[in-house]
Image (cartoon, rainbow, N blue to C red):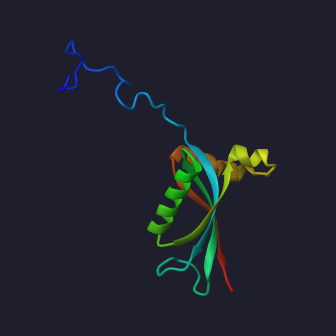
């Protein structure tokens, strides 16, 4: 019915409607390496030409994690130039990467908070 009720006047069941057919995709955490250039107010050392960042970002897929990361870095007055994805924790373990407990804890924090965490920032100099 047009008033949002069923034919018998009762409210629709929870989980019904146009979005009910689409199951919610789980969030995963992706390891990203981001190269940033210089921008006024970026907080990088005076003579730095840019920086490399290791980032853990949550998303339903890597593309979403990259979009969220770039948006947040731009809000922080950084100038993202290139993003390279290194996959999820599972992908990295399958590839033979050794991931220490501190790094895994940051990944789990990014997942729990649905956030972007910059784990490391290394300034570049000529």
Instruction: Please determine whether, in this image, residue 32 is positioned above or below residue 52.
Output: above
Extreme residue in the left direction: 3
| In-image side of 94 versus 120 (left or right) | right
- Front in this rendered view, residue 77 or 103: 77
The quadrant where residue 122 appears: bottom right
User: x, y percentage for residue 107?
Assistant: 63, 49
User: x, y percentage for residue 54?
Assistant: 65, 62
The quadrant where residue 90 appears: top right
User: x, y percentage for residue 57?
Assistant: 57, 53
Which residue is located at x 51 percent, y 63 percent? Answer: 70
Which residue is located at x 47 percent, y 79 percent? Answer: 41
Instruction: Please determine whether, in this image, residue 85 is positioned above or below residue 42.
Output: above
Instruction: Please determine whether, in this image, residue 87 is positioned above or below residue 69.
Output: above
Extreme residue in the top direction: 8
| Image quarter (top left, top right, bottom left or bottom right) of the C terminus | bottom right
| Image quarter (top left, top right, bottom left or bottom right) of the N terminus | top left
| In-image side of 92 versus 25 (left or right) | right
Extreme residue in the right direction: 96
Number of numbered discs: 0
Which residue is located at x 76 percent, y 46 percent? Answer: 93
User: x, y percentage for residue 16?
Assistant: 36, 24
Which residue is located at x 61 percent, y 83 percent? Answer: 49
């Amino acid at each position: 019915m047009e008033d949002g009720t069923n034919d018998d006047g009762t409210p629709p069941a929870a989980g019904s409607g146009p979005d009910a057919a689409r199951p919610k995709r789980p969030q995963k955490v992706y390891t990203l390496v981001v190269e940033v250039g210089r921008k006024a107010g970026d907080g990088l050392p005076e003579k730095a030409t840019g920086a490399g960042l290791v980032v853990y970002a949550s998303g339903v897929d890597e593309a979403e994690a990259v979009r969220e990361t770039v948006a947040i870095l731009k809000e922080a007055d950084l100038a993202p130039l290139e993003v390279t994805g290194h996959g999820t924790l599972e992908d990295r373990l399958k590839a033979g990467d050794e991931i220490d407990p501190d790094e895994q804890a940051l990944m789990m924090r990014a997942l729990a908070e649905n956030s972007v965490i910059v784990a490391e920032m290394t300034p570049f100099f000529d």
